[in-house]
Structures are given as structure tokens and as C-alpha cells.
Image: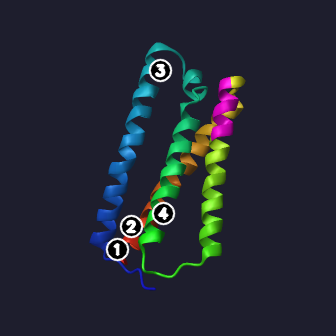
Amino acid sequence: MNFSVSKLERKAIYADLKTDYLYVAIPFMILIGIKLYLGTWQEIVLSPDWSLASCLVFGQITSKVSKAVAGSTIKTSSQHFGLYTAKRFFFVVVSIIFYCGMLAKPSLTLGYAQIMLFITASYFHFSDGYTTSLLQKNV
């Protein structure tokens, strides 16, 4: 199983991932701008939208990797793929729990935790997205 890609191909993959990510990042840049203009920085942290976005990103990641694995001719271990899927689904559930927590009883601690979850989702968007691209190239 050789996944060697040239530097140019790697840049192209990350350019695609950055483009996908912009559709997540732009609404949050607008949200932050509006919250800062109309309110305080605490409103940014207390916004439950961070958790909702994390849930969407984790769900998208899981879906993309699942499609890539299903369409790939590369043999994968069902146990490893099952563990991967379970971990990503766990993050989806945690995101939903954070979202409900922020709606029911918002706090700055929970707010910062959900932002860290969003940063984690962003990291996985790029790392899992890169893996997905490699799997799709070796179909």
C-alpha cells in the first residue's frame, strides 16, 4: 500500500480542503464580527453555534471517509475502520451534548470547551480529508 504523492499533488489536496473549510469558516468570521460589533467577546464564547459546527464537520468527515473506504480497492481492516467510525461518531455525540449544554445552561467554561472541540474538528477535517483523498486516488 504505497500512498506516495508529489509535493504538487499534496498542495492540490490541501487547497481543496481549504476551499471546503472556507464554507465553514466564513459564517464564523461573520458571526464573530457581528457579535463583536453588537455585543461583547463573551457572546462569541457563549454562542452554541461552535458545537453545532463541530457536529457538522465530524459528520462530514465520517461520511467522506466511509465513502472513500467503500469505493476503494485497498483492503482495510473492518476492526480498524469500525474503531475509526466509532471515534468520529463519539465526537458527533459529544458535540450534540455540548450544544444542548450551551442552550440549557451556558457558561464560559463550556463555551471554551466547545471552541476547543471546534478546533479539534478543524484539525480532523484536514487530516482525515487528506487520507480520504489518498484513498480516492488509489481506487
Give the spatial CA distance, label 1 vs label 2.
6 Å
User: According to the image, label 2 marks what residue?
Assistant: 133
- Nearest to N terminus: mark 4 or mark 1: 4
Residue 76 point in image, percent of width and height: 54, 78
Type of amino acid under label 3: Leu
Answer whether labels 4 and 1 touch (C-beta < 8 Å): no
Q: Which residues are magenta?
A: 96-103
Question: Which residue matches tag 4?
Answer: 65
In the image, is residue 131 above or below residue 125? below
Q: Amino acid at mark 2?
A: Ser
Cβ–Cβ below 8 Å for labels 1 and 2? yes
Crowding around mark 1 (Cα neighbors within 10 Å: few <14, some 14 to 19, many 20+) is few
Secondary-structure class at tag 1: helix
Toward the viewer: 119 or 104? 104
Q: Quadrant of residue 78?
A: bottom right
Q: In the image, which disc is placed on residue 36?
A: 3
Q: Amino acid at mark 1?
A: Lys
The image quarter containing residue 113 is top right
Q: Mark 3 falls on what kind of element? A: helix
Using residue 5 as the reference point, say whether residue 34 is left or right of it. Answer: right
